Amino acid sequence: MSALLSPHSSITVLGAGLVGRLLAAELARQGHAVEVHEAQGPDAQGAAARIAAAMLAPLAESAITEPGVVRMGHHALTRWPQLLAGLDWPVFFQQEGTLILWHRQDAAEAVRLRGVLERTARTVPELPALQALDAQGVGEAEPAVGGRFHQGLYLPGEGQLDNRQLLAALEQAMRARGVRVHWNSPRAPEDFTPGAPGQPDWVLDCRGLGARAQWQQLRGVRGEVVRLHAPGVTLRRPTRLVHPRYPIYIAPKQDHVFVIGATEIESDDLSPASVRSTLELLSAAYAVHPGFAEARILEIATQCRPTLPDNLPAVRQLAPRVLQVNGLYRHGFMISPAILDVVMELLNEGQSRLAPRFDLALELGAMPSRPETEPAAIHP
């Protein structure tokens, strides 16, 4: 199908979280006139992406999600290095796999988890095969925990990046590419009449929970994360600890900074973290490595992830020339490159070849096709 965007279309992006910044930077790179409205400031304080651990772990996450999301995550492992290479500022990126550990009392849960991961591997065979580790294998894979765990699983190829470095690098890329950004400027789709004189050609709504007035099925899923500085701890890769209620992750960033999290609470509550959650996260970290006892707590943060009823992302046409992108749940960094590529296909071609592969819900009405020299004419 023919492209919907002319060579120099004007696009307004609502929301400068992870997806909003990715789309704005990419559209500007392609030569379009891009304007962004964000309800808060450039430090992304209101975005779930600021709090995330930014792990790229499709097989590990398959314990709680669907094959389509796993395929999006696998896609991202190739796309993130490409996207990062186009940024002027460096962003920490690591692809050293994921280590899963458990204590003896949680062995039964570990057996169940391994069964889930093996079923995923059969469904998504392009993923690297998981490796079962004995005590020696655990010590070789992660010397810092050698002797403390008798079994583990290693998921090769998985990765992580630094979420805050990325958000800052994308903000710089937007400025460098001429994007007009309006901070502390909350706007909604009904504030625009795309296609009318003096209005943008398209509006892309990427506001997360800020879009609930227009997408009432959205809900918040609260997460609580601890950031530590632990000079006495060295971990090579993200490590997950099997837990009776939920898997706890420890993501090592640069300079001995660690992001620890796992909690999921069905709530829009943004109050400070509970004592129970904080104790569980810190106790789990100490159980993995005693060096965390002398770590310094840099931050205990909470945020709510925008989530749809099926916990899966979706793209929909709210009105002519208005697309909404939402529902990335806890998988924002893992699946956002796939979401970016699908939306760019829709805008450039009027359809997406990637979306069926990802089982991505598209509610598009009549996405038009047209010759590039004619004005776009979407119909409801």
Image: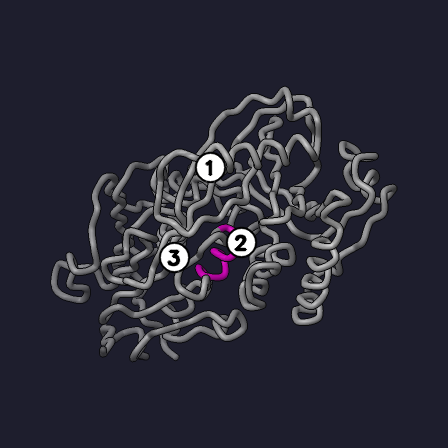
Q: Earlier in the sequence, mark 2 or mark 3?
A: 3
Give whichever of 90, 358 is nearer the camera. Answer: 358
Question: Between marks 3 and 1, how big is the CA–CA gap?
Answer: 25 Å
Q: Is residue 166 magenta?
A: no
Element type where label 3 sits in the image = loop
Q: Which region of the structure is painted magenta?
A: 333-340
Task: Mark yes or no: residue 29 visible.
Answer: no
Instruction: Say whether residue 199 is left or right of residue 133.
Output: left
Q: Earlier in the sequence, mark 1 or mark 2?
A: 1
Instruction: Say whether residue 5 is left or right of residue 236.
Output: left
Element type where label 2 sits in the image = helix
Quickly name the residue at label 2. Answer: 334
Q: Quadrant of residue 196?
A: bottom left
Instruction: Say whether residue 161 is left or right of residue 309.
Output: right
Q: Nearer the viewer, mark 3 or mark 1?
A: 1
Report if the CB atoms under discs 1 and 2 are less than 8 Å apart.
Answer: no
Question: Between marks 1 and 2, how big is the CA–CA gap?
Answer: 15 Å
The x and y percentages for residue 73 are 57, 58
What is the three-letter code of the residue carrying label 2?
Met
Q: Colour scheme in the image?
A: one colour
Quickly name the residue at label 3. Answer: 30
